[in-house]
Amino acid sequence: MNNWPSTTSILREFGFYSYLDAAGFANSEVGKNRGSAVDKAVTWLAMGHAVPPFTKPHPELDCYLDPFKDFLTQHEWIHHSHQNEFVCQEERFVSHPDLLGMLDGKLTVLEVKTGTFPEFVRLQTAGQVIAEGNRARRRVCINLPGNGKYKLTPLNDPRDFNAFIILARAWW
């Protein structure tokens, strides 16, 4: 449709992924494959399906998926959509939130992260809800660090929206 940047492209341009790149996570085949597999499996589970059949030969994913299953039993999640493209005409960028739905009765964008909690997720989710056109949507990160546990982090700082808009405008 257009050649506009994504939220990820904007954040990468301004160095927010540099520590991941330097560690080799973001650009390594292992990191990409793990992230892709966990993303697909988490989406499958979030939609209410049983354990994805494609994970059976990959028990190394259990330390990420088991905590996500725990999350689903401990919280009310009603799945609306995943990885939809939202276009922000005003600021000229696109965004693809991991999961959109109702978390414990509130409209939520749920961003899934494996490994360490990246601080840039605050700006990433701000860009996602700006593109969606619903700044009232709650932003939450579920961090799956690979230790068999999960951590939910609400992202409540309203300054994240202006910070992301500044970056989106500077990208051009």
Image (tube, grey):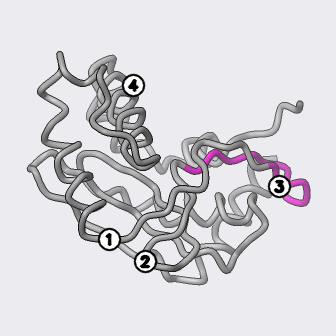
Q: What is the spatial separation of the Cα atoms under label 2 and label 1, in whole angstroms? A: 6 Å
Relative depth, front residue between 74 and 6? 74
Q: Secondary structure beneath disc 1?
A: loop
Residue 58 x, y percent position in the rendering: 18, 21
Task: Indicate left or right for 164 with 47 as reference.
Answer: right
Location of residue 153 by image quarter: bottom left
Mark 2 and mark 3 residues within 8 Å of each other at the beta carbon: no
Observer-side mark, 4 or 1, equals 1
Looking at the image, is mark 4 or mark 3 nearer the viewer?
A: 3
Which residue, given by chain and number where applicable, does mark 2 sit on? 104
| Residue 152 % position (x, y) | 31, 69
With respect to residue 26, does 93 lie above or below?
Answer: below
For mark 4, does the 10 Å Cα neighbourhood hold few (<14), some (14 to 19), or many (20 or more) residues? few
Label 2–label 1 contact, CB within 8 A: yes
Q: In front here: 47 or 109?
A: 47
> Mark 4–mark 2 contact, CB under 8 Å?
no
- Label 3, residues with CA under 10 Å away: few <14, some 14-19, many ≥20: some
Q: Residue at x 90, y 60 (%)?
A: 90
Q: Which mark is residue 27?
A: 4
SS category of the residue bearing label 2: loop
* Mark 3: secondary structure: strand
For the residues labelled 3 and 1, the Cα–Cα distance comes to: 31 Å
Tell me the amino acid under the disc marked 4. Asn
Q: Position of residue 11 (x, y in %)?
A: 57, 49
- Disc 1 marks which residue? 75
Sooner in the amino-acid sequence: mark 2 or mark 1: 1
- Do residues under tags 3 and 1 come within 8 Å of each other at their CB atoms? no
Cα separation between marks 4 and 2:
35 Å
What's the CA distance linking mark 4 and mark 1?
33 Å
Residue tagged by mark 3?
88
Q: Of label 3 and label 1, which has the lower sequence position? A: 1
In front of the other: 32 or 73: 73
